Image (tube, grey):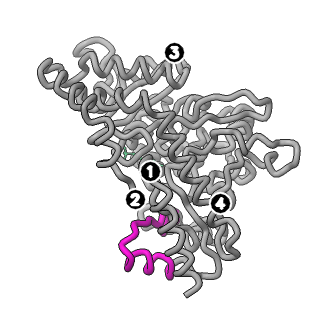
């Protein structure tokens, strides 16, 4: 699915040098490389505060702890996502309120969010799934109106530019009260182990979060709140520094590969290619932003295969040794850990359908035309078989 070796070979010298510097410095935790990466990422994202932490799941949990959410508070998030999002909500004894997604963008649907709001709702967690920024303008409007926090799960969309209807752009993850990301190796900005970060423009919240990641300490050995231990180590920060300089090039490479896949697949009657529109208004003629906007950085390139032929495609690709992923085969509302008998399966027509139709193809910074064509040929062969 990803070619981490191919990418490493292109940056090997620089990465090795950075890693060696950390090894000889012995500043393994909280060293200058961590501070440098934090500052570089703040500049890149144009956000006031980046708080590095241990991984993306921690980042989501720390965001909710920092916002002071209390047991019983309801948090609205997408039914169609990786479990980490709902997991930390449950761990903190908050109540995950899962909602259906938009069939075209796979992202949380603002109209469905509105219907899920109750007096107990405290926050919305949009997930920028597969690298495509959710409809943040509509989500922020709903949040303002109902006085809710917005935590962006930006694990899959770092580097994406969200374009408002006014034409203004802002980096994904810096729009809500707080953004959370992951530097897991296969993510768009991946390190060589685990890593994560939080982003916020709120000075007070940033201060709180910096304490939460460090045992609730704001002054050495004074523990003001219950926190966690979650750190990005210096080796990972040094590697991320090398890759951050190339993140825009990486995003371009992914977008180019996506464009090539789409050009091939789009005329097939049983295949739906991913959409890059950012919001419902993009359906209307006057938008025209989507062809040029970078709201989608293609963490995954995900097709919908119609008429029940998805599994046929999957088994054919498996036979041919072509990697693929089914993200996600089971919607969260049907997972044992998140099952709630008051929640009806038929409230999720879109996620139930997507779970049967989606298939993600190899997507990374090193894909070439020959590989794309080979994958295309085999997918089509499988459907027509
Ligand atoms: C990867 C991912 C996470 C978790 O990140 P980790 O670093 O693996 O903990 C959370 N949410 C989404 C949507 C992800 O894709």
In the rendered image, the vertical position of residue 92 relative to residue 247, given as above or below: below
Which residue is tagged 2?
Answer: 1
* Helix, strand or loop under label 3: helix
Q: The magenta stretch spans which residues?
A: 311-332
Measure the alpha-carbon separation of dots 3 and 4. 45 Å
Measure the alpha-carbon separation of dots 1 and 3. 35 Å
Q: Are marks 2 and 3 in contact (CB under 8 Å)?
A: no
Q: Which residue is drawn at 74% across and 40% down?
A: 138
Q: Earlier in the sequence, mark 2 or mark 3?
A: 2
Q: Position of residue 337 (x, y in %)?
A: 42, 62
Q: Do the residues labelled 1 and 2 touch (CB within 8 Å)?
A: yes
Work out whether residue 93 or residue 126 is closer to the camera in this orientation and state it. Answer: 126
Q: Nearer the viewer, mark 3 or mark 4?
A: 4
Q: Which residue is drawn at 60% across and 32% down?
A: 176
Q: Which mark is residue 263?
A: 4
Q: Please state if 313 lies on the left or on the right of 39 as rendered.
A: right
Q: In which quarter of the image is residue 62?
A: top left
Q: Which mark is residue 203?
A: 3
* Helix, strand or loop under label 4: helix
């Amino acid at each position: 699915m990803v070619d981490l070796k191919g990418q490493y070979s292109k940056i090997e010298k620089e990465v090795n040098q950075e890693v060696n510097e950390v090894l000889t410095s012995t500043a393994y935790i909280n060293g200058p490389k961590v501070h440098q990466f934090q500052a570089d990422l703040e500049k890149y994202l144009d956000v006031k505060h980046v708080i590095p932490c241990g991984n993306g799941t921690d980042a989501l949990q720390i965001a909710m702890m920092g916002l002071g959410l209390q047991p019983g508070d309801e948090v609205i998030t997408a039914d169609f996502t990786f479990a980490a999002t709902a997991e930390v909500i449950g761990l903190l004894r908050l109540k995950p309120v899962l909602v259906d997604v938009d069939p075209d963008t796979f992202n949380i649907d603002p109209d469905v969010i509105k219907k899920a709001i109750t007096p107990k709702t405290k926050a919305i967690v949009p997930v920028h799934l597969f690298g495509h920024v959710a409809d943040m303008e509509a989500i922020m409007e709903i949040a303002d109106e109902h006085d809710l926090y917005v935590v962006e799960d930006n694990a899959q969309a770092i580097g994406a530019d969200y374009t408002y209807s006014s034409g203004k752009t802002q980096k994904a993850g810096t729009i809500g009260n707080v953004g959370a990301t992951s530097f897991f190796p296969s993510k768009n900005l991946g390190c060589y182990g685990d890593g994560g970060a939080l982003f916020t423009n709120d000075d007070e919240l940033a201060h709180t979060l910096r304490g939460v990641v460090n045992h609730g300490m704001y002054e050495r050995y004074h523990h003001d709140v219950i926190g966690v231990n979650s750190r990005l180590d210096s080796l990972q920060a040094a590697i991320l520094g090398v890759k951050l300089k190339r993140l825009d090039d990486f995003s371009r490479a992914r977008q180019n590969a996506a464009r090539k896949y789409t050009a091939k697949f789009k005329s097939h009657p049983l295949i739906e290619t991913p959409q890059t529109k950012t919001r419902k208004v993009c359906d209307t003629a006057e938008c025209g932003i989507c062809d040029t906007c970078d709201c989608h950085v293609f963490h995954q390139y995900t097709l919908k295969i119609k008429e029940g032929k998805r599994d046929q495609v999957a088994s054919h690709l498996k036979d041919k040794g072509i990697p693929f992923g089914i993200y996600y085969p089971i919607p969260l509302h049907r997972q044992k850990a998140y099952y709630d008998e008051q929640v009806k399966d038929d409230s999720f027509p879109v996620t139930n359908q997507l779970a049967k139709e989606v298939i993600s193809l190899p997507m990374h910074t090193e894909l070439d035309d020959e590989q794309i064509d080979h994958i295309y040929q085999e997918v089509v062969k499988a459907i027509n078989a």
